Amino acid sequence: PKVGHIFGLTGFAFKNEKLLMKVSGCCFSIVFDYLIKAMGKTNLTIDNFGNLPIVDSMYDGEIIVRALLLTCLTSNYKDLWNKVFDISAVNNSWSIEDERIKVKFELLSKEWMPEYALRNDFERRNCLIEIDVLVSMALGLTINDLLSIYEIQFPVLKMYDQDTWYDSNGRIVFTNNRGLTNVGFERTEFEQIKNAKAGEKFYRTISDDTMPGGQVERTIEYVAPFDKCDRIQDYKQAWEFFSKKYGRSEE
């Protein structure tokens, strides 16, 4: 609320916050990214945004709560959470079990709390994986459709996936993603610690200017072991999980 912007962005207002979060969740997916690419567009404008589908499906609640978890990072989003969150979401679960995923659905409540936000890189990535699968299912796609979209239409994302490493706390310790500047160690530094034993700790000090009050030095701790994720296998696992949950045949 009470935030504006110049024409460098295109804004869309919704009368219904629940619909806002459903559409937002869909727009977080590579499926909707692909739909824009398929239109031959490089930007989101009123013309092509209006051609995106709004799908009502049995997966709406799953998509909405994940969009809230990704979005509601600060108290500025407290009212949004309180209005949209459905208490039935406490019955949801993640498609994988991993200690790096800190947020548990069963601990969520109607009143927003800071610990509800997905904050580390690994758990945010996993949430987006699940959104990709849920949106695909909502649109009637198959797992092979989703894999084809990823492998054929997103070669740069695939290249980044193949060389992005996470520590045992879910932080990105190294990535070749050119959009994530100053994230993790440089390649030469990472190669020296890549095969570190479990529990070994490494530190990196950066200048952080993301908060009010000016630039401050911050030291980040990375804890071994370090590993990569396989998006294709993650898609397949999430697809199997939600297919079993909703009694959907696995295409």
Image (spheres, rainbow, N blue to C red):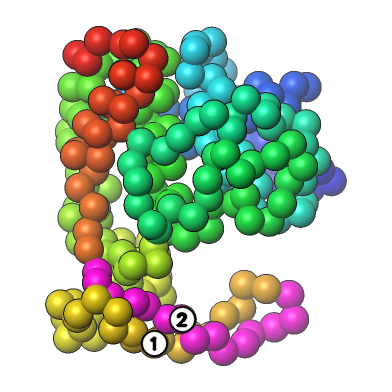
Marks 1 and 2: CB-CB under 8 Å?
yes
Magenta stretch: residue 45 in it?
Answer: no
227 vs 246, left or right, is: left
Neighbor class of circle 2 (other Cα within 10 Å; few <14, some 14-19, many 20+) is: few
On the image, the x and y values in percent for residue 138 come to 42, 15
Q: Is residue 127 visible?
A: yes
On the image, the x and y values in percent for residue 216 come to 62, 87
- The residue located at (40%, 58%) in the rendering is 100
Magenta stretch: residue 225 in it?
Answer: yes
Q: Nearer the viewer, residue 241 or 202?
A: 241
Residue 243 figure quarter: top left
* Residue bearing mark 2: 220
* Residue bearing mark 1: 203
On the image, the x and y values in percent for residue 29 come to 42, 33
Mark 2 residue type:
Ile
Label 1 vs 2, first from the N-terminus? 1
- The residue located at (30%, 32%) in the rendering is 238
Q: Quadrant of the C terminus?
A: top left
Instruction: Provide the secondary structure element on which disc 1 rests.
Output: strand
Mark 1 residue type:
Tyr
- The residue located at (57%, 89%) in the rendering is 217
- The residue located at (59%, 33%) in the rendering is 90
Residue 1 figure quarter: top right
Magenta region:
212-226
16 lies above or below 71: above
